[in-house]
């Protein structure tokens, strides 16, 4: 059983930056692919970025490429999402999730989820 806790959300102006963190406990963190998802009101949950077990492979949706960076520190059992040049339409609850397989894009494939952290981007 893996327990995930996100932090780092908040209110930021358009063009600003935030760094999200997701700390894991339980299980063996380095065995898991980690993903960041987001869900805006009235919309489906979508993947934003993912990183494989070693950190050597990453995935981003097209709209965040060049602005967001996913990384992980296996010693600290933490995954990060650095978000730059944020846009108002990226206001959402951001979740981290863990899965054994690379590369799963559907949220249904992920086994463990955090509680989410709110990101609000004002225009």
Image (cartoon, rainbow, N blue to C red):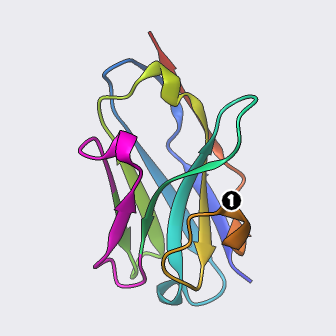
Q: Position of residue 80 (x, y in %)?
A: 41, 58
Residue occupying the point 61% across, 33% down: 92
* Position above or below: 72 against 123: below
Q: Position of residue 98 (x, y in %)?
A: 60, 73
Q: Which residue is mark 1?
A: 114
Residue 75 placement: quadrant: bottom left
Residue situated furthest top in the rendering: 123
Residue occupying the point 72% across, 53% down: 115
Residue situated furthest left in the rendering: 66
Residue occupying the point 47% across, 20% down: 88
Q: Secondary structure at mark 1?
A: loop
- Horizontal placement of 27 versus 88: left or right? right
- Front-most of residues 44 and 26: 44
Residue occupying the point 54% across, 65% down: 23
Q: Position of residue 8 (x, y in %)?
A: 49, 43
Please state the total of marks drawn on the protein image: 1
Q: Residues within 10 Å of mark 1 (few under 14, many from 20)?
A: many
- The quarter in which the C terminus is drawn is top left
* Position above or below: 20 against 85: below
What segment carries the magenta color? Answer: 52-69
């Amino acid at each position: 059983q893996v327990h995930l806790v996100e932090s780092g959300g908040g209110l930021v102006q358009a063009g600003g930056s935030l760094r999200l963190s997701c700390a894991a406990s339980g299980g063996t963190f380095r065995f898991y692919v980690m993903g960041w998802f987001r869900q805006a009101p009235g919309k489906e949950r979508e993947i934003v970025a993912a990183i494989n077990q070693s950190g050597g492979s990453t995935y981003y949706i097209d709209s965040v490429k060049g602005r967001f960076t996913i990384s992980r520190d296996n010693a600290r059992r933490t995954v990060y999402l650095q978000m730059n040049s944020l846009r108002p339409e990226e206001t959402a609850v951001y979740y981290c999730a863990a899965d054994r397989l690379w590369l799963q894009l559907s949220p249904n494939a992920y086994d463990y989820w955090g509680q989410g952290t709110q990101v609000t981007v004002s225009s």
